Image (cartoon, rainbow, N blue to C red):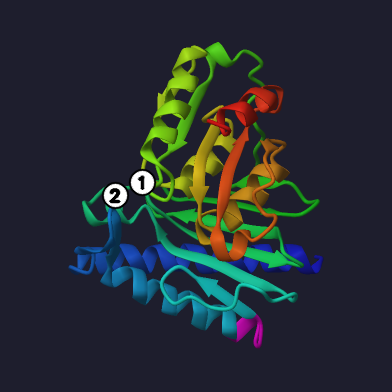
Amino acid sequence: MNDLARRRDAAAQIAVEAADLAQRMREAGGGVASLKGAQDFITEADGATERFIRDRLAAQFPDEAILGEEMGGAADTKGPLWVLDPIDGTSNFSRGGDRWCVSIGLVVDGHAVAGAIARHAPAEVFAAAQGLGATLNGSPIHAAPTTDIGRAIIECGWSLREPIARFHRMAEGVTARGAGLRSGGSGALGLVEAAAGRLDAYLELHINAWDAAAAIIIAREAGCWTNGFDSGDWLASGNPIGVGAPALGAQLAALLEA
């Protein structure tokens, strides 16, 4: 097993354990949400889950940098950098829904190279490492073979970091092309569901590194068209993101320019 495969598998195991911890905390009352900002939720479970992930990563990969949604960290390291979101889809999590996940990605020299995303229910683990393909619960996954955008299902993530008028234009562009429009409240899950062919694409005008560091390499290894998300100042400032069926790439890129 090469080093990236070992790190992918470690991320997957830790993500599963972290998702189980978050679920137990929710059942014990730790899923009550407060607001960090407009439509930006946090629960007691977010902090506890991030601490758990950090401790497990530090034990297995000592002295490697970590960047997390709740506790921050260095974003400019040139060495291995773990980028994590302890609970992506906190608004769903806090209301008792199942559309949330734990995301752990590995970045080397500024680019995503491995990662894993775990759901509690249904029990699913999406994982990938550069050059080694992408899997769901150990079985290979691939982007949808869709060639006609009029038959596509596209999820559009909503971000308050961009003017709402831009989101409206993007969503209108999707429906004007005849595609079905979805929005599920977890960017990480939307991205990997596109990687698995459950969706034909996922688009968002701005997403943070911790939401997508694992998902972008999973999508890329599944054969998706992907935009240049993990480039520029993405670790510190985020970027637009798009992944989807490879035959739709040019049209998806145009929708991101809304």
Q: Is mark 1 on a helix, strand or loop?
A: loop
Identify the residue under disc 1: 99
Residue 9 position in % (x across, y down): 65, 64
**Residue 27: which quarter of the image?**
bottom left
Near-viewer residue (230 or 103) = 230
Magenta region, residue range: 59-64
Residue 146 position in % (x across, y down): 63, 19
Q: Is residue 161 left or right of residue 151?
A: left
Q: Which of marks 1 and 2 is nearer the N terminus?
A: 2
On the question of residue 138 being in view, the answer is no
Asked if the residue at tag 2 contacts the one at tag 1, i.e. Cβ–Cβ closer than 8 Å, the answer is: yes
Q: Residue at x 50, y 51 (%)?
A: 207
On the question of residue 216 being in view, the answer is yes
- Magenta stretch prevailing secondary structure: loop
Screen quadrant of the N terminus: bottom right
Q: Is residue 73 left or right of residue 167?
A: right
Residue 257 position in % (x across, y down): 58, 32
